[in-house]
Image (cartoon, coloured by chain):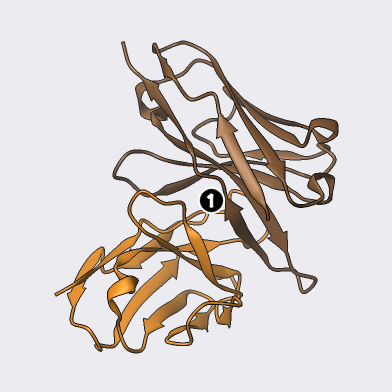
Chain colours: A brown, B orange
Amino acid sequence: EVQLVESGGVVVQPGGSLRLSCVVSGFTFDDYTMHWVRQAPGKGLEWVSLITWNGASTYYADSVKGRFTISRDNSKNSLYLEMNSLRNEDTAFYYCVKDHYHSSGWHWFDPWGQGTLVTVSS
Amino acid sequence: DIQMTQSPSSLSASIGDRVTITCRPSQDIDKYLNWYQQKPGKAPKVLIYAASSLLPGVPSRFSGSGSGTDFTLTISSLQPEDSATYYCQQTYSTPPWTFGQGTKVEIK
Protein backbone atom coordinates (compact mmCIF):
# COMPACT_ATOMS: atom_id res chain seq x y z
CA GLU A 1 0.00 0.00 0.00
CA VAL A 2 1.31 3.43 -0.95
CA GLN A 3 1.58 5.78 2.02
CA LEU A 4 2.76 9.37 2.40
CA VAL A 5 2.98 10.65 5.95
CA GLU A 6 3.69 14.32 6.59
CA SER A 7 4.93 15.76 9.86
CA GLY A 8 6.32 18.97 11.26
CA GLY A 9 3.29 21.22 11.23
CA VAL A 10 3.12 23.48 14.29
CA VAL A 11 2.20 26.99 15.35
CA VAL A 12 4.98 29.44 14.44
CA GLN A 13 5.32 33.20 14.68
CA PRO A 14 5.44 35.45 11.61
CA GLY A 15 8.99 35.63 10.33
CA GLY A 16 9.79 32.22 11.75
CA SER A 17 11.03 29.05 10.10
CA LEU A 18 9.84 25.48 9.89
CA ARG A 19 10.77 22.23 8.19
CA LEU A 20 8.12 19.82 7.01
CA SER A 21 8.89 16.17 6.34
CA CYS A 22 7.13 13.47 4.38
CA VAL A 23 8.07 9.82 4.65
CA VAL A 24 6.78 7.55 1.91
CA SER A 25 6.38 3.81 1.54
CA GLY A 26 4.86 1.35 -0.87
CA PHE A 27 6.59 2.59 -4.02
CA THR A 28 10.08 3.22 -5.34
CA PHE A 29 10.52 6.78 -4.11
CA ASP A 30 13.48 7.68 -6.29
CA ASP A 31 11.53 6.90 -9.46
CA TYR A 32 9.10 9.77 -8.93
CA THR A 33 8.80 13.52 -9.00
CA MET A 34 7.17 14.81 -5.81
CA HIS A 35 5.12 17.88 -4.91
CA TRP A 36 3.95 19.96 -2.00
CA VAL A 37 0.42 21.37 -2.27
CA ARG A 38 -1.22 23.53 0.39
CA GLN A 39 -4.73 24.44 1.36
CA ALA A 40 -5.63 27.26 3.72
CA PRO A 41 -8.47 26.27 6.07
CA GLY A 42 -11.74 26.42 4.16
CA LYS A 43 -10.01 27.53 0.96
CA GLY A 44 -8.87 25.96 -2.30
CA LEU A 45 -5.79 24.07 -3.35
CA GLU A 46 -2.51 25.83 -4.15
CA TRP A 47 0.41 24.04 -5.75
CA VAL A 48 3.57 25.01 -3.84
CA SER A 49 6.62 23.20 -5.19
CA LEU A 50 7.97 20.29 -7.23
CA ILE A 51 11.21 18.31 -7.14
CA THR A 52 12.30 15.82 -9.77
CA TRP A 53 13.29 12.25 -8.92
CA ASN A 54 16.97 13.06 -8.42
CA GLY A 55 16.55 16.54 -7.00
CA ALA A 56 18.15 18.10 -10.05
CA SER A 57 15.20 20.34 -10.84
CA THR A 58 12.91 22.24 -8.53
CA TYR A 59 10.02 24.62 -9.16
CA TYR A 60 8.11 26.97 -6.87
CA ALA A 61 4.94 29.00 -6.81
CA ASP A 62 5.62 32.72 -6.98
CA SER A 63 4.03 33.10 -3.54
CA VAL A 64 6.82 31.06 -1.89
CA LYS A 65 9.78 31.57 -4.22
CA GLY A 66 12.86 32.67 -2.32
CA ARG A 67 11.37 31.67 1.05
CA PHE A 68 10.69 27.94 0.70
CA THR A 69 13.10 25.18 -0.35
CA ILE A 70 12.06 21.70 -1.42
CA SER A 71 14.48 18.82 -1.06
CA ARG A 72 14.55 15.03 -0.82
CA ASP A 73 16.66 12.23 0.58
CA ASN A 74 16.08 9.16 -1.53
CA SER A 75 18.05 6.98 0.90
CA LYS A 76 15.46 7.81 3.55
CA ASN A 77 12.37 7.81 1.29
CA SER A 78 11.79 11.34 2.49
CA LEU A 79 10.63 14.67 1.06
CA TYR A 80 11.16 17.98 2.83
CA LEU A 81 9.95 21.57 2.70
CA GLU A 82 12.09 24.18 4.41
CA MET A 83 9.94 27.24 5.10
CA ASN A 84 11.51 30.58 6.05
CA SER A 85 10.21 34.11 6.58
CA LEU A 86 6.78 32.69 7.27
CA ARG A 87 3.74 34.93 6.84
CA ASN A 88 0.20 34.73 8.15
CA GLU A 89 -0.95 33.78 4.66
CA ASP A 90 1.23 30.65 4.74
CA THR A 91 -1.20 29.16 7.26
CA ALA A 92 -2.48 25.99 5.62
CA PHE A 93 -2.58 22.25 5.49
CA TYR A 94 0.48 21.10 3.57
CA TYR A 95 0.11 17.94 1.51
CA CYS A 96 2.91 15.76 0.24
CA VAL A 97 1.91 14.40 -3.17
CA LYS A 98 3.33 11.85 -5.57
CA ASP A 99 3.44 12.79 -9.24
CA HIS A 100 2.01 10.21 -11.59
CA TYR A 101 3.47 10.44 -15.07
CA HIS A 102 1.88 8.78 -18.07
CA SER A 103 4.07 7.92 -21.04
CA SER A 104 1.90 10.11 -23.26
CA GLY A 105 3.07 13.12 -21.30
CA TRP A 106 0.25 13.53 -18.82
CA HIS A 107 0.89 14.25 -15.15
CA TRP A 108 -1.52 13.96 -12.28
CA PHE A 109 -1.23 14.00 -8.51
CA ASP A 110 -1.82 10.67 -6.84
CA PRO A 111 -1.80 9.77 -4.04
CA TRP A 112 -1.82 12.54 -1.45
CA GLY A 113 -0.73 12.39 2.16
CA GLN A 114 -3.14 13.29 4.94
CA GLY A 115 -1.63 16.76 5.36
CA THR A 116 0.06 18.59 8.20
CA LEU A 117 -1.22 21.92 9.53
CA VAL A 118 1.08 24.92 9.66
CA THR A 119 -0.29 27.88 11.58
CA VAL A 120 1.53 31.21 11.38
CA SER A 121 0.33 33.44 14.16
CA SER A 122 1.66 35.72 16.84
CA ASP B 1 1.15 31.74 -14.94
CA ILE B 2 -2.01 30.03 -16.20
CA GLN B 3 -5.12 31.00 -14.26
CA MET B 4 -7.94 28.48 -13.92
CA THR B 5 -11.52 29.68 -13.55
CA GLN B 6 -14.19 27.25 -12.42
CA SER B 7 -17.92 27.79 -12.46
CA PRO B 8 -20.12 27.69 -10.60
CA SER B 9 -18.39 28.09 -7.24
CA SER B 10 -21.16 26.03 -5.68
CA LEU B 11 -24.30 24.20 -6.68
CA SER B 12 -27.11 22.27 -5.10
CA ALA B 13 -28.73 19.40 -6.97
CA SER B 14 -30.99 16.44 -6.32
CA ILE B 15 -30.12 12.77 -6.39
CA GLY B 16 -30.22 11.58 -9.98
CA ASP B 17 -29.63 15.03 -11.48
CA ARG B 18 -27.06 15.65 -14.17
CA VAL B 19 -24.40 18.05 -12.89
CA THR B 20 -21.91 19.99 -15.00
CA ILE B 21 -18.90 21.97 -13.80
CA THR B 22 -16.89 24.19 -16.12
CA CYS B 23 -13.20 25.01 -16.04
CA ARG B 24 -11.62 27.65 -18.23
CA PRO B 25 -7.85 28.23 -18.31
CA SER B 26 -6.45 31.63 -19.20
CA GLN B 27 -4.60 30.14 -22.18
CA ASP B 28 -4.72 27.07 -24.41
CA ILE B 29 -3.63 24.00 -22.43
CA ASP B 30 -4.45 21.34 -25.04
CA LYS B 31 -5.81 18.48 -22.91
CA TYR B 32 -3.50 18.88 -19.91
CA LEU B 33 -6.38 19.05 -17.48
CA ASN B 34 -7.11 16.94 -14.41
CA TRP B 35 -10.16 16.78 -12.12
CA TYR B 36 -10.04 16.05 -8.39
CA GLN B 37 -12.69 15.36 -5.77
CA GLN B 38 -12.20 16.41 -2.16
CA LYS B 39 -14.49 15.41 0.67
CA PRO B 40 -14.46 17.32 3.99
CA GLY B 41 -11.47 16.49 6.14
CA LYS B 42 -9.89 14.35 3.43
CA ALA B 43 -7.13 14.76 0.90
CA PRO B 44 -8.10 15.25 -2.74
CA LYS B 45 -8.53 12.25 -5.00
CA VAL B 46 -7.89 12.32 -8.74
CA LEU B 47 -10.86 11.38 -10.93
CA ILE B 48 -9.86 12.28 -14.49
CA TYR B 49 -6.62 13.03 -16.32
CA ALA B 50 -5.95 14.28 -19.84
CA ALA B 51 -9.33 16.02 -19.79
CA SER B 52 -11.39 12.89 -20.38
CA SER B 53 -9.57 9.76 -19.15
CA LEU B 54 -11.19 8.19 -16.12
CA LEU B 55 -8.87 6.70 -13.51
CA PRO B 56 -9.52 3.05 -12.60
CA GLY B 57 -12.10 2.67 -9.87
CA VAL B 58 -13.82 5.98 -10.60
CA PRO B 59 -17.55 5.47 -11.21
CA SER B 60 -18.60 5.75 -14.84
CA ARG B 61 -21.16 8.46 -13.99
CA PHE B 62 -18.18 10.83 -13.96
CA SER B 63 -16.94 12.08 -17.31
CA GLY B 64 -14.75 14.86 -18.60
CA SER B 65 -14.57 16.65 -21.89
CA GLY B 66 -12.96 19.60 -23.60
CA SER B 67 -9.66 20.87 -24.85
CA GLY B 68 -7.87 24.17 -25.25
CA THR B 69 -9.62 26.69 -23.05
CA ASP B 70 -12.95 25.05 -22.26
CA PHE B 71 -13.44 21.95 -20.13
CA THR B 72 -16.32 20.29 -18.32
CA LEU B 73 -16.75 17.67 -15.61
CA THR B 74 -20.13 15.95 -15.74
CA ILE B 75 -21.78 13.73 -13.17
CA SER B 76 -24.49 11.99 -15.15
CA SER B 77 -26.65 10.94 -12.19
CA LEU B 78 -25.74 12.55 -8.89
CA GLN B 79 -25.37 10.20 -5.93
CA PRO B 80 -25.22 11.02 -2.19
CA GLU B 81 -21.53 10.11 -2.03
CA ASP B 82 -20.74 12.72 -4.71
CA SER B 83 -21.22 15.55 -2.22
CA ALA B 84 -17.76 17.12 -2.30
CA THR B 85 -15.67 19.94 -3.71
CA TYR B 86 -14.28 19.44 -7.20
CA TYR B 87 -11.11 21.05 -8.54
CA CYS B 88 -9.64 21.27 -12.00
CA GLN B 89 -5.87 21.47 -12.46
CA GLN B 90 -3.68 22.23 -15.45
CA THR B 91 -0.35 20.49 -15.99
CA TYR B 92 0.59 22.19 -19.25
CA SER B 93 4.25 22.87 -19.90
CA THR B 94 6.47 23.68 -16.90
CA PRO B 95 5.13 24.44 -13.43
CA PRO B 96 3.38 26.18 -11.75
CA TRP B 97 0.57 23.67 -12.24
CA THR B 98 -2.39 25.63 -11.03
CA PHE B 99 -5.78 24.60 -9.64
CA GLY B 100 -9.18 26.12 -10.13
CA GLN B 101 -10.82 27.68 -7.10
CA GLY B 102 -13.15 24.72 -6.60
CA THR B 103 -16.84 23.91 -7.01
CA LYS B 104 -18.77 22.72 -3.98
CA VAL B 105 -21.50 20.22 -4.87
CA GLU B 106 -24.26 19.79 -2.34
CA ILE B 107 -27.21 17.45 -2.32
CA LYS B 108 -30.68 19.01 -2.03
Q: Is residue B44 left or right of residue B93?
A: left
Which residue is identified by label 1? Answer: B1
Q: Which quadrant holds residue A92?
A: top left
Say how many tags the image has. Answer: 1
Where's the N terminus of chain A, which quadrant?
Answer: bottom right
Chain for numbered disc 1: B
Q: Is residue B94 visible?
A: no
Out of A81 and A22, give the one closest to the viewer.
A22
Where's the C terminus of chain A, which quadrant?
Answer: top left
Horizontal and vertical percent position of residue B95: 63, 50
Q: Residue at x 32, y 39 (%)?
A: A41
Horizontal and vertical percent position of residue B77: 32, 88
Q: Which quadrant holds residue B50?
A: bottom right
Q: Is residue A110 left or right of residue B59?
A: right
Q: What is the three-letter code of the residue carrying label 1?
A: Asp
Q: Tag 1's secondary structure?
A: loop
